[in-house]
Amino acid sequence: MLGSPIAHSLSPVLHRAAYRALGLTGWTYQAIECDEAALPALLDSRGPDWAGLSLTMPLKRAVLPLLDHIEPLAAETGAANTVVFGAGRRHGHNTDVPGALAALAAHGITATSLPPGATVLILGAGATACSALAAARGLAVTEVTVAARDPARATPLLAVAGRLAMKVTLTPFAPPASGAPDLLISTVPAAAADPYTQRIAARTFRPRRLLDVIYHPWPTPLATAARQAGATVAPGFDLLLHQAALQVELMTGSAAPLEPMRTAGLAALESR
C-alpha cells in the first residue's frame, strides 16, 4: 500500500485477512510511505516476487504515466488505485468505482432503486470525486452537481466528466437554499462537511441517501445527521472493503473472502 501519509491505512488488515483465509502463507502486504517524487524509483525497484500495489493519495493520478497498460475505467477517471504486475508489465486498474457501486448496492442503492431523473450531489472535486462521478454513471445518472471547495482545482474532474459523457454543474461549497439530492456523496474530510451536517440536523436539507467515503472515525457527524433524518447511509468502510476485495482478486486470481476481510477490518477499527 503506497501513499503519504499512510500509517493510518486499514488496507493491510483487509489484505492480510484475505491471504489467511485463502491459505496464501507466502504472501505479505505492507504499508509503504511514498510520495509522488519517490514513486518512479519505487516502481522500478519491485522484483518478480511482487504481485501488485495499492495506491492512495497523492499517487492515483501520478502513477498513470508510469504504467504499461491502463484499463478503461482508470483511463476514464484519470486515477488508478491498483497496479498489477504481470509478464514484466504494469497494469493500472480502478477498483474505487466498482467498490463504491458495491457499497451502495449493499444498502439497496442501485440504478433501479433510484427514481427516474435522480439527482446526485458530490461534495469535493478531487480524485475520489472523479471515481464518485463514474459511480454515478454506473447508477445510470448522466447529470451531477459537484460542490467544490476550490473550483479552480476542478479542471481534472471536468475532463473526467467529458470522458464519461456526463454533465457536471459546479456549485459553491454550501448546501442549496432549497431542495435536496436523491443521493449525496461526500468525498471530503469529515469536518469539511460541517455546513451540510448542520443543515441536515436542522432538517432544512434532507438528502434521501448518503455515501460518505470516510471510514474512521465512524460514524461521521454527516452520517449521523443523515441517518437521524431518515436517510439511507452507506458507510465508507463498505467502499474500502469492496475495493480491497477487487484488488485481492486482481492480485491473487482468487475470489476474495469478503466476510473474513470484513470481520478483521471492523475489529481493527474497534480497537483504534
Image (cartoon, rainbow, N blue to C red):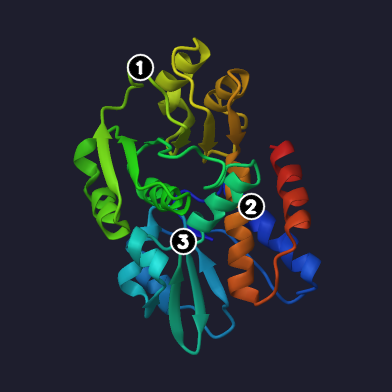
Find numbered disc 3 in the image and state the secondary structure of the residue it sits on. loop
Please state which amino acid type lies under the numbered disc 3: Asn
Residues packed near mark 3 inside 10 Å, few (<14), some (14 to 19) or many (20 plus): many
Q: Which mark is residue 81?
A: 3
What separation in Å lies between label 2 and label 1 (alpha carbons)? 34 Å
Badge 1 vs badge 3, beta-carbon distance below 8 Å: no
Of residues 17 and 71, the one nearer the viewer is 71
Extreme-front residue of the structure: 116
Kindly identify which residue carries mark 2: 241
Q: Considering depth in this image, is 160 or 221 the residue closer to the camera? A: 160
The residue at 62%/32% (across/down) is 218
Going from N to C along the chain, the mark reached first, 1 or 3, is 3
Task: Tell which circle, 2 or 1, labels the residue nearer the N-terminal end.
Answer: 1
**x and y percent of residue 172 in the render?**
26, 27
How many numbered marks are there?
3
What distance separates the C-alpha of mark 1 from that of mark 3? Answer: 36 Å
How far, Cα to Cα, is label 3 from label 2? Answer: 14 Å
Specify the amino acid type for callout 1.
Ser
Q: Horizontal and vertical percent for residue 146?
A: 32, 37
Residue at 41% x, 53% y: name it: 134
Quarter of the image with the C terminus in it: top right
- Could you say which disc has been placed on residue 178 in the image? 1
Q: Is residue 48 left or right of residue 249?
A: left
Q: Position of residue 34 (x, y in %)?
A: 43, 59
